[in-house]
Structures are given as structure tokens and as C-alpha cells.
Amino acid sequence: MKVCLGGADGNEAVQQGELENRLNLDTKALQILETKKPRWNAELDAWTMDFKGRVKLASKKNFQLIQESEPEKILMLFGKVTKNRFTLDFRAPMTVCKSLAVALSTFADKLAVT
């Protein structure tokens, strides 16, 4: 998953249709966050991620967002705690509204192409 935030601080407004232009012309005007990739654990014979004890259950909805330039700095963490509960942690440039929107997008059903 990739997330694009407007402006150097992530808070600049982006007009409709402008996102495609900025991606092609001026990537400095956007901050692009991406999902941190899991690492292979030979002991467990599985892909794993360190959620710092915040996530308790395996789920395809669990993820961490990072900037490519700083892969060890987690900007947003979302994961399953119980059957019906999830945890959401974030830091700047993410805001409550942006983090919640990204987290809710993991629950959206994929539309079938007909």
C-alpha cells in the first residue's frame, strides 16, 4: 500500500486532479509513505513484523507505514488486538483524521471489475 500526503509537512491541500500531475512532475510536493515489508523468520518458517507488542493477532489487515528514506521510523501502525478490536498508533506527519482514513481503507471491500 502507498499513501500520498500533500506538502512537505503532509498538510498542504491538493486540488482534484492535481495529484497525478504532482506525482509525474514534482515529487517533493508530496510525501509518499509505503507499507513496511515483512522479514522472513527461518525459526518460525514464516514472514514476520515487529509490532512492538501492540498487535496480538495475525491478520492481513496488520501493517506499518514508513517513508522509504527512513525505514526504521514507523509513522503509522495498525493491527488486530482481539477478534473485534484493532490498535492504531501514529506520529507526525500523520494526523488523527488521515490515520483513521487509511486504517478504515483496509476494511473496504474490493470492487469486482465486470
Image (cartoon, rainbow, N blue to C red):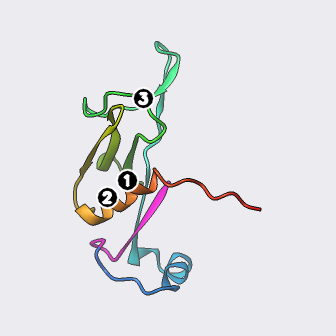
- In this rendered view, identify the residue nearer to me: 6 or 73: 6
Kindly identify which residue carries mark 3.
Answer: 58
Sequence-wise, which precedes: disc 2 or disc 3? 3
- Side (left or right) of 27 relative to 86: right
Q: Position of residue 112 (x, y in %)?
A: 69, 57
> From which residue to which does the magenta span run?
1-10
**Secondary structure found at label 1:** helix
Mark found first going from the N terminus, 1 or 3: 3
Gap in Å between the C-alphas at discs 1 and 2?
A: 5 Å
CA separation in Å, label 1 and label 3: 16 Å
Instruction: Residue 91 in the image: state x and y as whole percent.
Output: 22, 55
Q: Is residue 2 magenta?
A: yes
Q: Position of residue 71 (x, y in %)?
A: 37, 47
- Image position of 25 with respect to 94: above or below: below
Name the residue tied to disc 1: 103
Where 13 sits versus 40, above or below?
below
Q: Which residue is mark 2?
A: 100
